[in-house]
Amino acid sequence: MQEAYCRIATLDSVDHIDCGHAYFFSIARNLLLRKLKRQQVVPFEAIGEIESYRDTQTPSPEEQVSTRLAYERVMGLIAGLPERCRRIVELRKIEGWSQKEIAAHMGMTEKAVEKQVWIGVRAIREGWSAATGSPEADAPAPAPGRKAGLL
C-alpha cells in the first residue's frame, strides 16, 4: 500500500488520472504482480486472481457503450414528444426543476405540469418498450399521482 502511495506521490502531474481509486488499484495490482513474479515458487491461482480483478465501481467498456446507447435512445424518445410536453419533461426529469418552478416559468398550473410529465414519461416508457419488445408496452400505466402496484 505504501509503495503504491509513493508511486502516486512521485508523479509530476495527476491531470491524466480520470478515476483516482481505479488508478491506485491498478498500481497496487501491478506492484503485487511484480512481487509475485519475482518469487521462485508462485501458485498460478494467486496470479490468476490478481490479473482477473476488476474494480466493480468502474463500468466496463461494454457497459459504457450500452449506457451511452440507452441514453441516446431515451433522448430520441424525448425529442419525439410534442414541444410543450418535451420541454416540461426536460425541465423536470433532466434539469431537476420542481413542478412549482416549471409552472411559474411556463405560466401554467402545477397540476397541468404534473399531467404533462405523466404523459411524457408514459410515452417514453411505451416507446422504450416497443423498441425493446418488452411486455411492459401492453401493461396499463398508473394514473397520475399514483405509483405502480398501489391502489
Image (cartoon, grey):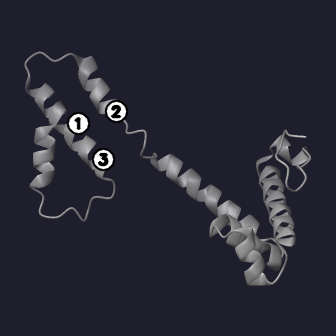
Q: Of tags 3 and 1, which is closer to the observer?
A: 3
Give the number of callouts.
3
The spot of residue 67 in percent (x, y) is 57, 53
Q: Is residue 106 above or below residue 61?
A: below
Where, by quadrant of the figure, is residue 134 drawn? top right
Residue highlighted by disc 2? 53
- Label 1–label 2 contact, CB within 8 A: yes
Residue drawn at 10 percent across, 47 percent down: 6
Quadrant for the C terminus, please: top right
The spot of residue 2 in percent (x, y) is 12, 39
Residue drawn at 84 percent across, 54 percent down: 126
Query: Which sits earlier in the primary sequence, circle 1 or circle 2?
Result: 1
Q: Is residue 28 above or below residue 131?
A: above
Characterize the local packing of mark 3: few (<14), some (14-19) or many (20 or more) Cα atoms within 10 angstroms.
few
Query: Could you say which is closer to the camera, residue 99 or residue 140?
Result: 99
Characterize the local packing of mark 2: few (<14), some (14-19) or many (20 or more) Cα atoms within 10 angstroms.
few
The spot of residue 106 in percent (x, y) is 77, 83
Residue drawn at 64 percent across, 63 percent down: 72
Where, by quadrant of the figure, is residue 123 drawn? bottom right
Is residue 56 found left or right of 115 in the rendered image?
left
Q: CA distance from mark 2 to mark 3?
A: 14 Å
Which label number is shown at residue 21?
A: 3
Query: Could you say which is closer to the camera, residue 19 or residue 32?
Result: 19
Query: Could you say which is closer to the camera, residue 145 or residue 148?
Result: 145
Which label number is shown at residue 134?
A: none
Q: CA distance from mark 3 to mark 1?
A: 12 Å
Give, as a three-letter code, the residue at label 1. Arg
Label 3, secondary structure: give it.
helix
Which label number is shown at residue 29?
A: 1
Give, as a three-letter code, the residue at label 3. His
